[in-house]
Amino acid sequence: MRPIRRRAFCQGSAALTTLFPLAIGAQPPAPRVVASFSILADMAQELVPAGVQVTALVGPDSDAHVYEPSPADGKRLAQADLVLVNGLGFEGWIERMVKVSGYRGPVAVASQGIQPRSGGHHDGDPHAWQDLALARRYSANISAAIAQRWPGQRDEIARRNADYVARIDLLDVRVRQWLGAVPRAQRRVITSHDAFGYFGVAYGVDFLAPQGWNTHSEPSAAAVARLIRQIRKDEARAIFVENISDPRLVERIAREGGARVGGTLYSDALSKPGGPAATYLQMFEHNARSLAAALQV
Ligand code: ZN
């Protein structure tokens, strides 16, 4: 059945080309980069040459851990010129999705070369974008993949990478200043899931969470009870909900511990445009400023 239908389609489009050669030739589709989630899409947006479109499969305020691809997403993937993923096991669904969609182009891994944090029985912590020093590596990897795909724009891509890395480095210095102003013993924070391990190591903050490196399974009652005890003993100074998670569990932990939720951290997704974390750098600044403000009290 299939080859016959395809032949019929080709004949049809050949006829159209004969009838409307200019209309079809005049508007080639813009080259497309499809990134697995919003943070990666924003980084790519900073680095692609002019005229390249970037979209994300998992959009703002959405949880990539539990994402289920739709047929429309598969179609979008099939039409991509380059696919970008985080790697480190973050997008458990991507391999199958690529296979099913029929996409045959390159799949670039933004975290390539980064040694993941390890611990417990997990494979490794995928949230490496939560350290600005590692974001430099993301920028270099994404730039290399884009330059390989569009070699004619190599110089423009290299310029964009240098500019972006300079902004990343500048923010890194400021984040160290903000958090450095908080006594080390006060830097203990509760969030929904364990997404800030890299942030914690880089900037000297201890994060406690009822959920682990992914959000697939419910947190255990013991983990929740332990956090409540820690708040009561004043072992955690600030409690944050996350933009990708149902806030009710963290709100309950705060209530039962006799504390208040200090705000929202952006862990695995940006905010919607116009929100406080609409780009990766805005997200990082928002998180660092919110943490420093809450911990200083
Ligand atoms: Zn996560």
Image: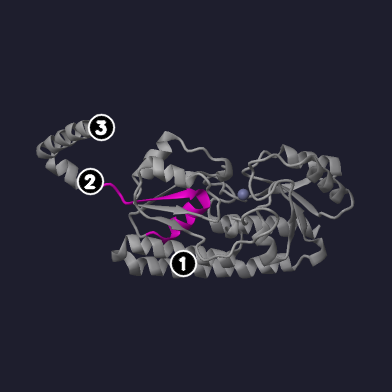
For marks 1 and 3 on the same chain, the one whose residue lies earlier in the sequence: 3
Q: Which residues are magenta?
A: 29-48
| Circle nearer the N terminus (3, 2) | 3
Does 294 sit left or right of 22 as displayed?
A: right
The image shows residue 13, relative to residue 135, as above or below, that is above
Question: At x 63% / y 47%, what residue is drawn?
Answer: 214
Q: Secondary structure at mark 2?
A: loop
Residue found at x 69% / y 69%: 177
Disc 2 beta carbon < 8 A from ligand 1? Answer: no
Residue named by callout 2: 27
Q: CA distance from mark 2 to mark 1?
A: 32 Å
Q: Which mark is residue 187?
A: none
For the N terminus, the quadrant is top left
Residue drawn at x 54%, y 50% is 278
Q: Quadrant of the C terminus?
A: bottom right
Distance (Cα) linking label 1 and label 3: 42 Å
Residue 292 occupies which quadrant of the picture? Answer: bottom right
Between 262 and 37, the residue placed more toward the observer is 37
Q: Amino acid at mark 3?
A: Arg
Residue 200 visible in this rendered orientation of the protein: yes
Classify 208 as above or below 145: above
- Horizontal side of 268 relative to 150 (left or right) equals right
The three-letter amino acid code for the residue at tag 2 is Gln
The residue lying toward the viewer, choosing from 218 and 166, is 218
Between circles 2 and 1, the one closer to the viewer is: 1
Residue receiving disc 1: 140
Q: Is residue 190 magenta?
A: no
Q: Point out the frontmost of discs 1 and 3.
A: 3
Q: Quadrant of residue 258?
A: top right
Label 2 CA crowd tier, 10 Å (few <14, some 14–19, many 20+): few
Residue at the spot of label 3: 2
Mark 1 or mark 2, which is nearer the start of the sequence? Answer: 2
